Image: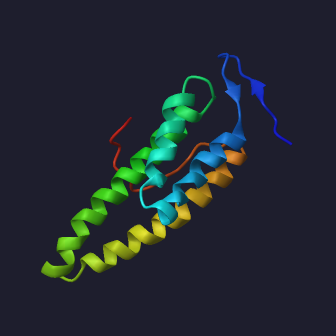
Amino acid sequence: MQVISVTQTGKKTDNNLLVFTHLSQFLTYVTGFGGFIVPLILWLVKKDEIAGMDEHGKSIINLQLTMLLIGLISIPGIFLFGLGILSLIWVGIISFVMPIINAVKASKGEEPSYFSTIRFIS
């Protein structure tokens, strides 16, 4: 059962859409790039209509951009120092765990917490 209410600011509260936005990041494992495109589209379309979507969407996009940047920097790091493999493992773990944690937080109406991400969009 989906509960949608209207806040004092006139925005709807839809935690299910916030959860879906976080979990849509897993499309990266299926399509390769859908984990960035789908949350970006949802955020751009719904940020003015859904309470919390702006904050959650920015957090998701910042995470995706940070993981992409670290992944790109890690590839030459493998050849130069061999430590790039550790950062690629870290990217893999964070990219899998954090969307799940924040989807649960979104279902409870809490703010997202993507630690160690670069704030490209604030």
Quadrant of the image containing the C terminus? top left
Give coordinates of residue 72: x percent, y percent. Answer: 25, 63
Is 75 displayed left or right of 4 in the figure? left
Residue at the image point whose x is 41% and y is 53% from the top: 64
Residue at the image point whose x is 25% and y is 76% from the top: 84
Is 15 displayed left or right of 93 in the figure? right
Residue at the image point whose x is 51% and y is 35% from the top: 43
Residue 1 occupies which quadrant of the picture? top right
Residue at the image point whose x is 29% and y is 62% from the top: 70
Give coordinates of residue 21: x percent, y percent. Answer: 59, 46
Image: 60 above or below 8: below
The colour scheme used here is rainbow
Image: 38 above or below 72: above
Q: How many marks?
A: 0
Is 99 displayed left or right of 79 in the figure? right
Image: 21 above or below 9: below
Looking at this view, is 55 or 50 the one in front?
A: 50
Give coordinates of residue 101: x percent, y percent. Answer: 61, 58
Give coordinates of residue 28: x percent, y percent. Answer: 47, 60
Is residue 109 at least partly visible in the picture? no
